[in-house]
Image (cartoon, rainbow, N blue to C red):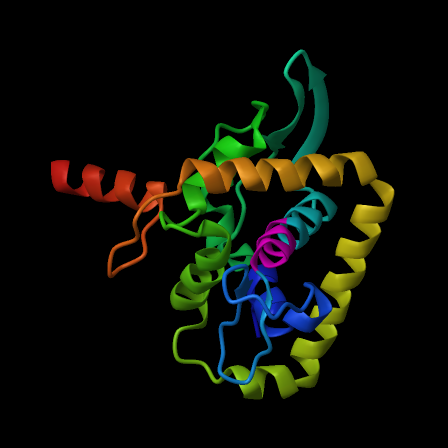
Protein backbone atom coordinates (compact mmCIF):
# COMPACT_ATOMS: atom_id res chain seq x y z
CA UNK A 1 0.00 0.00 0.00
CA UNK A 2 1.48 3.34 -1.11
CA UNK A 3 0.83 6.03 1.47
CA UNK A 4 2.79 9.27 1.27
CA UNK A 5 4.95 10.42 4.21
CA UNK A 6 2.34 13.18 4.84
CA UNK A 7 -0.52 10.69 5.21
CA UNK A 8 1.55 8.48 7.53
CA UNK A 9 2.20 11.53 9.73
CA UNK A 10 -1.51 12.44 9.75
CA UNK A 11 -2.63 8.90 10.62
CA UNK A 12 -0.19 8.68 13.54
CA UNK A 13 -0.02 12.23 14.90
CA UNK A 14 0.80 10.91 18.38
CA UNK A 15 4.27 10.01 17.02
CA UNK A 16 4.95 13.33 15.30
CA UNK A 17 3.30 16.20 17.23
CA UNK A 18 2.57 17.49 20.72
CA UNK A 19 -0.90 17.27 22.19
CA UNK A 20 -2.67 20.52 23.03
CA UNK A 21 -5.99 21.54 24.58
CA UNK A 22 -6.00 24.80 22.63
CA UNK A 23 -8.80 24.96 20.07
CA UNK A 24 -7.13 27.98 18.46
CA UNK A 25 -3.67 26.41 18.03
CA UNK A 26 -4.71 22.78 17.93
CA UNK A 27 -6.00 20.55 15.19
CA UNK A 28 -7.55 17.11 14.74
CA UNK A 29 -8.44 15.46 11.44
CA UNK A 30 -10.49 12.46 12.60
CA UNK A 31 -13.19 12.06 15.27
CA UNK A 32 -11.09 9.60 17.29
CA UNK A 33 -7.96 11.76 17.24
CA UNK A 34 -6.76 13.91 20.12
CA UNK A 35 -5.95 17.54 19.39
CA UNK A 36 -2.37 18.34 18.36
CA UNK A 37 -0.33 21.49 17.84
CA UNK A 38 -1.05 22.55 14.24
CA UNK A 39 2.47 23.92 13.67
CA UNK A 40 4.04 20.68 14.90
CA UNK A 41 1.85 18.84 12.40
CA UNK A 42 2.89 21.08 9.48
CA UNK A 43 6.59 20.87 10.47
CA UNK A 44 6.38 17.07 10.64
CA UNK A 45 4.52 16.73 7.33
CA UNK A 46 7.17 18.81 5.57
CA UNK A 47 10.13 17.54 7.61
CA UNK A 48 9.37 13.83 7.25
CA UNK A 49 8.78 14.26 3.51
CA UNK A 50 12.01 16.23 3.00
CA UNK A 51 14.01 13.72 5.08
CA UNK A 52 12.71 10.88 2.90
CA UNK A 53 13.40 12.82 -0.33
CA UNK A 54 16.98 13.54 0.77
CA UNK A 55 17.54 9.89 1.74
CA UNK A 56 16.09 8.67 -1.57
CA UNK A 57 18.30 11.05 -3.57
CA UNK A 58 15.61 13.35 -5.07
CA UNK A 59 16.68 16.63 -3.47
CA UNK A 60 19.55 18.38 -1.71
CA UNK A 61 19.12 20.92 1.08
CA UNK A 62 21.59 23.58 2.14
CA UNK A 63 21.54 26.15 4.92
CA UNK A 64 22.91 29.45 3.66
CA UNK A 65 23.77 32.39 5.89
CA UNK A 66 23.21 35.87 4.51
CA UNK A 67 22.85 39.45 5.72
CA UNK A 68 19.15 38.94 6.43
CA UNK A 69 19.67 35.75 8.43
CA UNK A 70 19.67 32.16 7.28
CA UNK A 71 17.65 30.51 4.60
CA UNK A 72 17.32 26.96 3.38
CA UNK A 73 18.00 26.34 -0.29
CA UNK A 74 16.53 23.36 -2.08
CA UNK A 75 17.89 21.74 -5.25
CA UNK A 76 15.79 19.14 -7.04
CA UNK A 77 17.98 16.44 -8.61
CA UNK A 78 15.32 14.50 -10.50
CA UNK A 79 11.57 14.23 -10.95
CA UNK A 80 9.74 13.15 -7.79
CA UNK A 81 7.13 10.35 -8.12
CA UNK A 82 3.51 10.89 -7.04
CA UNK A 83 3.88 8.45 -4.13
CA UNK A 84 5.58 11.24 -2.12
CA UNK A 85 2.26 13.11 -2.01
CA UNK A 86 0.75 16.43 -3.03
CA UNK A 87 3.03 18.39 -0.71
CA UNK A 88 5.95 17.81 -3.14
CA UNK A 89 4.14 19.20 -6.19
CA UNK A 90 5.66 22.65 -5.63
CA UNK A 91 9.14 21.13 -5.37
CA UNK A 92 8.52 19.12 -8.55
CA UNK A 93 7.60 22.31 -10.42
CA UNK A 94 11.03 23.80 -9.70
CA UNK A 95 13.76 23.65 -12.34
CA UNK A 96 16.14 20.72 -11.77
CA UNK A 97 19.68 21.49 -10.51
CA UNK A 98 18.75 25.08 -9.62
CA UNK A 99 18.93 26.08 -5.94
CA UNK A 100 15.76 27.88 -4.80
CA UNK A 101 14.60 29.08 -1.36
CA UNK A 102 12.67 26.21 0.23
CA UNK A 103 9.69 28.48 1.02
CA UNK A 104 9.26 29.26 -2.70
CA UNK A 105 8.76 25.57 -3.46
CA UNK A 106 6.66 24.83 -0.36
CA UNK A 107 4.11 27.63 -0.55
CA UNK A 108 2.95 26.45 -4.00
CA UNK A 109 1.62 23.26 -2.36
CA UNK A 110 0.11 24.91 0.75
CA UNK A 111 -3.64 25.66 0.76
CA UNK A 112 -4.76 29.28 0.85
CA UNK A 113 -6.50 29.64 4.23
CA UNK A 114 -6.63 31.69 7.40
CA UNK A 115 -4.60 28.97 9.20
CA UNK A 116 -2.42 27.21 6.59
CA UNK A 117 -0.54 25.05 9.13
CA UNK A 118 -3.82 23.42 10.17
CA UNK A 119 -5.46 23.28 6.73
CA UNK A 120 -2.40 21.66 5.12
CA UNK A 121 -3.42 18.33 6.67
CA UNK A 122 -7.05 18.77 5.58
CA UNK A 123 -5.96 19.48 2.00
CA UNK A 124 -3.62 16.44 1.91
CA UNK A 125 -6.26 14.06 3.28
CA UNK A 126 -8.89 15.30 0.80
CA UNK A 127 -6.48 14.78 -2.10
CA UNK A 128 -4.81 11.56 -1.01
CA UNK A 129 -6.82 9.55 1.53
CA UNK A 130 -10.25 10.19 -0.01
CA UNK A 131 -12.65 7.47 1.20
CA UNK A 132 -10.13 4.98 2.58
CA UNK A 133 -10.85 3.74 6.12
CA UNK A 134 -8.23 5.44 8.28
CA UNK A 135 -8.74 3.15 11.29
CA UNK A 136 -8.17 0.05 9.15
CA UNK A 137 -5.00 1.66 7.79
CA UNK A 138 -3.77 2.36 11.33
CA UNK A 139 -4.24 -1.29 12.23
CA UNK A 140 -2.49 -2.59 9.10
CA UNK A 141 0.93 -4.04 10.14
CA UNK A 142 2.48 -2.96 6.82
CA UNK A 143 1.34 0.64 7.36
CA UNK A 144 2.62 0.60 10.97
CA UNK A 145 6.00 -0.70 9.74
CA UNK A 146 6.22 2.09 7.14
CA UNK A 147 5.36 4.67 9.79
CA UNK A 148 8.12 3.36 12.08
CA UNK A 149 10.62 3.48 9.20
CA UNK A 150 9.60 7.06 8.35
CA UNK A 151 9.81 8.11 12.00
CA UNK A 152 13.35 6.70 12.25
CA UNK A 153 14.46 8.49 9.04
CA UNK A 154 12.91 11.76 10.28
CA UNK A 155 14.41 11.55 13.80
CA UNK A 156 17.84 10.72 12.39
CA UNK A 157 17.59 13.64 9.91
CA UNK A 158 16.76 16.11 12.73
CA UNK A 159 19.60 14.85 14.95
CA UNK A 160 22.21 14.99 12.20
CA UNK A 161 21.08 18.38 10.84
CA UNK A 162 20.09 20.46 13.88
CA UNK A 163 20.74 23.88 12.34
CA UNK A 164 19.19 22.89 9.01
CA UNK A 165 16.09 21.62 10.84
CA UNK A 166 15.68 24.97 12.64
CA UNK A 167 15.94 26.63 9.22
CA UNK A 168 13.29 24.31 7.75
CA UNK A 169 10.87 25.26 10.54
CA UNK A 170 11.33 28.95 9.64
CA UNK A 171 10.81 28.17 5.94
CA UNK A 172 7.51 26.41 6.74
CA UNK A 173 6.43 29.47 8.77
CA UNK A 174 7.29 31.75 5.83
CA UNK A 175 5.43 29.48 3.37
CA UNK A 176 2.37 29.63 5.66
CA UNK A 177 2.57 33.44 5.72
CA UNK A 178 2.66 33.53 1.90
CA UNK A 179 -0.66 31.66 1.56
CA UNK A 180 -2.53 33.24 4.45
CA UNK A 181 -5.95 34.35 3.24
CA UNK A 182 -9.62 33.42 3.27
CA UNK A 183 -10.30 29.84 2.26
CA UNK A 184 -13.17 29.03 -0.07
CA UNK A 185 -15.51 26.03 0.05
CA UNK A 186 -12.88 24.14 -1.92
CA UNK A 187 -9.34 24.32 -0.60
CA UNK A 188 -6.83 25.23 -3.30
CA UNK A 189 -3.10 25.94 -3.48
CA UNK A 190 -1.28 28.56 -5.59
CA UNK A 191 -0.26 25.68 -7.87
CA UNK A 192 -3.92 24.65 -8.30
CA UNK A 193 -4.71 28.25 -9.29
CA UNK A 194 -1.86 28.35 -11.83
CA UNK A 195 -3.04 25.06 -13.34
CA UNK A 196 -6.63 26.30 -13.56
CA UNK A 197 -5.47 29.50 -15.26
CA UNK A 198 -3.40 27.48 -17.73
CA UNK A 199 -6.30 25.10 -18.47
CA UNK A 200 -8.76 27.96 -19.05
CA UNK A 201 -6.30 29.45 -21.59
CA UNK A 202 -6.24 26.12 -23.45
Question: Is residue 32 rendered to the left or right of residue 19?
Answer: left
Residue 137: image x %, image y %? 58, 82
Q: Is residue 92 visible?
A: no
Q: Is residue 25 left or right of residue 202?
A: right
Which image quadrant: the C terminus?
top left
User: In this orientation, does residue 135 appear?
Assistant: yes
Residue 58 among those drawn in magenta: no
Residue extending farthest right: 160
Q: Please report the bounds of the magenta region as a residue range.
A: 38-46
Residue 62, by quadrant, is: top right
Residue 100 in percent (x, y) is at 55, 25
Residue 45 covered by magenta stretch: yes
Image position, residue 8 (x, y; %) = 61, 68
Give the total number of marks visible in the rendering: 0
Query: Quick check: 109 left or right of 197?
Result: right
Front-lying residue, 41 or 72: 41
Q: Is residue 57 above or below residue 49?
A: above
**The N terminus - image quarter:** bottom right
Residue 31 vs residue 54: left or right? left
Residue at x 49%, y 58% (from the top left corner): 118
- Going by the picture, which residue comes out furthest to the top? 67
Amino acid sequence: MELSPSVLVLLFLEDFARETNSIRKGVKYFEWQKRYNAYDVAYSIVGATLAKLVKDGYIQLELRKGLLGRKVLLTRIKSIPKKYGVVVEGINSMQAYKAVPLRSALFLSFPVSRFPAAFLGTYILRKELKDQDELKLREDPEVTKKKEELKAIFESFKMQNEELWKGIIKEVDKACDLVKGKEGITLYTPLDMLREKHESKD
